[in-house]
Image: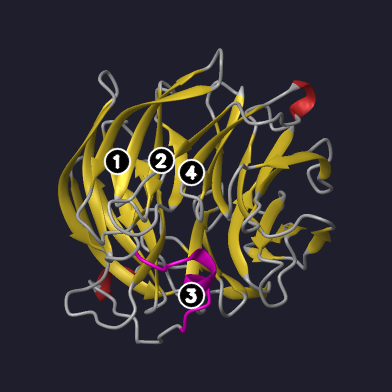
Amino acid sequence: MTGLTRRTFLGAAAGASAATVLGSQLASAATTPKGCFAGGTVYIGSYTSGANGHGLDVTTRSGAALNPVRTVPGITDTSWFDRSADGKTLYVTNEGDPNGYVSALNLADPAKPKLLNKVSSKGGAPTHLSVHSSQKYVLAANYSSGSVVVLPIQAGGKLGAATDLMTHHADTGQAHAHQVVNDPTGRWVLSVDLGADSVYVYSLDVATGKLSLHQQLKLPSGAGPRHLAFDRTGKFAYVLQELRPEVTVASWDAATGTLKALSVVPAVPAGSTGELYPGEITLSKDGKFAYTTVRGPNTLATFTVSGATLKLVSTVPTGGNWPRHVALDPSENWFYVSNQRSGTVTWLPRDPATGLPGAVAGSLSVGSVNSVYFAS
């Protein structure tokens, strides 16, 4: 991890290798689904510090296809989204380094977000945020600073100055906080740190906005955990590793706030070589399937999910270079993949029965794209 900064990693040369499909008879069953959700507002984030990045774009859909975008001016390096439970406010990271910010935008008209304010993230390269389930705070992870910040939500959705900042420390190299979320009960806050090879568990005092460290789950050195996702029951968490193309399956005890690593599952087929850097993990609403992007081979991996059992069943090409993020649309009939280096968002159909993606059905050009967020 020594010397690995976010910008040097993002700028590293990408390898291109052929994607592999496991269980091709299943993958071929993924056909264009019927009843595709159309319309709605879609937000797209991209790096203004990258090639042709816009920052924050707004679009809609015609069928599955994304329409041409409209850029919201003045919102730089937008790299993550979350929304208040009432749908009235959108929060985005502005991934500046060394000085990062978090912006709050009013969604009275979802197609025309209006900036309410932006506040310091108290660190560099805030790469992820989430609205705490209490709806009183926005939590953000500062990648280059290896820290987690708590920002209070004020009347009308504006953000106040930080109420707390927790800084991680790596045994070797630098800490790099990559995600911060609360658990399904809302009682605990978990932060995944790529540089510290750890998942930190905090309690949050919702009255004061102060965090207290409860547990630090250390993963093997060099694993590089990036993001986690909870299963439908809230009893298991799947931790996607970036520096090793794997998913760590962990049990989660909400009563005691304890995360325990159980097993490790590859995110690529056996024998895969070259650059292998997983990007995002997400689960289907029914909890039966998990999906990850893998940069290098530029694939979307599908896993079957059953509690402590995670099984890789398919990998298919994303149709672009360096798939940083994947999102399912509200109907879960389509995947939308943000291919950062090719500057494209591609969409692939999803077979609801098998959970498997089909071939790429279309593409939209967005320079230095990093993520897609569905508002409706």
Pointer 4: what residue? 147
Of circles 3 and 2, the one toward us is: 2
In reply to whether residue 10 is colored magenta, the answer given is yes
Q: CA distance from mark 2 to mark 4?
A: 9 Å
User: Which quarter of the picture shows residue 223?
Assistant: bottom left
The magenta span reads: 1-13
Q: Residues within 10 Å of mark 1 (few under 14, many from 20)?
A: many
Foreground: 133 or 160? 160
- Going from N to C along the chain, the mark reached first, 2 or 4, is 4
User: Left or right: where does residue 196 sit relative to residue 133?
Assistant: left
Callout 2: SS:
strand
On the image, the x and y values in percent for residue 36 come to 58, 56
Of circles 4 and 3, the one toward us is: 4
* Residue 231 visible in image: no
Q: CA distance from mark 3 to mark 1?
A: 25 Å
User: Left or right: where does residue 317 sit relative to residue 112?
Assistant: left
Quarter of the image for the N terminus: give it.
bottom left
Pointer 1: what residue? 237
Callout 3: SS:
loop
On the image, the x and y values in percent for residue 105 come to 77, 40
Q: Are marks 3 and 1 in contact (CB under 8 Å)?
A: no
- Going from N to C along the chain, the mark reached first, 3 or 1, is 1
Q: Are marks 1 and 4 in contact (CB under 8 Å)?
A: no
Which amino acid type is shown beneath numbered disc 2?
Ser
Q: Residues within 10 Å of mark 3 (few under 14, many from 20)?
A: many
Foreground: 232 or 84? 84
Q: CA distance from mark 3 to mark 2?
A: 24 Å
Pointer 2: what residue? 191
